[in-house]
Amino acid sequence: MKITIVGAGYVGLVSGVGLAAAGHTVTCVDRDAAKVDAIKSGKAPFYEPGLNELLCEQLASCRLTAATHLEEELAECDVSIIAVGTPSDETGIDLSYVRQAAREIGRRLRTLGPYHVVVVKSTVVPATTDTVVLRELEAASGLVSGRDFGLAMNPEFLSEGCAVADFSRPDRIVIGADDKRTRTILSEMYAMFDSPIVHTTLRNAEMIKYAANALQATLISFSNEMAGLCEAVSGMDEETVMRGVHLDKCWRVPVGAGDPPVARAVSYLRAGIGFGGSCFPKDLKALRAFAKDKGVEMPILDSALKVNEERAGRVVELLAAHIGSLSGKRVAVLGLAFKPGTDDVRESPGLRIAKMLLLHGAQVVLHDPVVQFEAVHAQLGEVTQAGDVADAATEADAVVIATGWDAYRDIEWNDIVRRMRSPVILDGRQVVSAECLMSGTTLLATGRRTEVVRHGRVGEGSPTNMTEGAA
């Protein structure tokens, strides 16, 4: 099957490489010539484990290519996939890129095959594909959907950091279409994938994506709310509490070959410093705006966003409660990517914390094993980016762990503590074990009361400081 994907960003490129690996001939089209050149050279324009290797394999097989001109690449194409960005804020979703892609495809529909299928993979609110996209396609082509061409909604469920595996071994494929011919063509496109296929309407397919993201984000905020209580009460820690929750048989559903018996959902039932990235914040805001437009209140969604928005501020408050005024203090923030396995800094909790520290007058030093300084300089201004964790922590009054990179777990933390002016570690991702730290180190960690290491044993910090809020 010949497939053209409009948009060579995160979703478009990962999907393109995955479909090529499944045996299809795929062209990823993007107006950004530099991005297209990078893809052609075998270098993804963003960091994603395993993607460059698979990209090179598919380029070598000639099943994958990239281009800047959509019109030429649509020739003899069976399926075109819209995978462009859909920025969202409190006012709603921006569909300008989706509209433009639909118009461009529509202008070529008459010259394509007998029943070309247009697929929307971009995340759009319900009642977008069968209204906005449909109108653009029919107006530009003069054809009728369901009679002359097919229209489908096929949401993506890719998690940054493991997107290649997510596409190669999906836990489900959702195909929204209103006619049998379209459903059959997309079923053939995914014939090589061994996973359940949900056939449904266009609007249900759109909503499934938002419901999935909203649930995961809500689980994170719920866990952070539980962590706040555990941090305030002696004898409780969120990690143990959630381990007991995870063992509930309702979570013990295998999600794919080789996966552990506990479903991935439990990974969202852990405390931290909040969620970020390109999906959860914008999608929850878009869904809330959509619901408001329909006159529907979403109190659980409102609360999930509120807990997340407040989390970074409470981390800073907790840190200030232990080291005093932040003005002039040197604070190392470790981790700028919103999660491990990616260089995406959109809505990064680490950046939110760094900005707040700067507003309090702190001297902020940044480190991330993958994120480049250029990606954050414009947002933070004059800050220092250290080459390694040791440099970042030298003479620091505190260290904040904002991303749970494995590289941070493998550090000899006592060596880091010795370099610090004040041995205070705020572990926002449950990376450091208190039992491995030298005496006198103060460990502020999400989900439990403050711990001060004394003579190789872990003790609690002062009650006054321990109730200052969730990390």
Image (cartoon, rainbow, N blue to C red):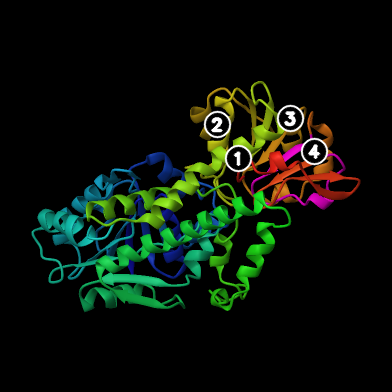
In the image, which disc is placed on residue 356? 2
Q: CA distance from mark 2 to mark 3?
A: 16 Å
* Amino acid type shown at disc 1: Val
Q: Secondary structure at mark 2?
A: helix
Q: Nearer the viewer, mark 3 or mark 1?
A: 1
In the orientation shown, which residue stands out farthest toward the left?
Answer: 142
Decide which of tag 1 and tag 4 comes sooner along the chain: 1
Image spot of residue 438 (x, y percent): 86, 43
SS category of the residue bearing label 1: helix
Residue located beneath label 1 in the image: 315
- What label sits on residue 397 in the rendered view? 3
The numbered dot on residue 416 is 4
Residue range (magenta): 423-441
Q: Which of the two discs, 2 and 1, labels the residue nearer the N terminus?
A: 1
Q: Label 3 vs label 4: CA separation?
A: 12 Å
The rendered magenta stretch, by its main secondary structure, is classed as loop
Identify which amino acid the numbered label 4 is placed on. Ile
**Residue in the image at 17% along x and 67% along y:** 149
Lower position in the chain sequence, tag 2 or tag 3: 2
Quadrant assignment, res 334: top right
Q: Callout 2: few (<14), some (14-19), or many (20+) C-alpha neighbours within 10 Å? A: some
Q: CA distance from mark 2 to mark 1?
A: 10 Å
Tell me how far mark 4 sits from mark 2, CA to CA.
24 Å
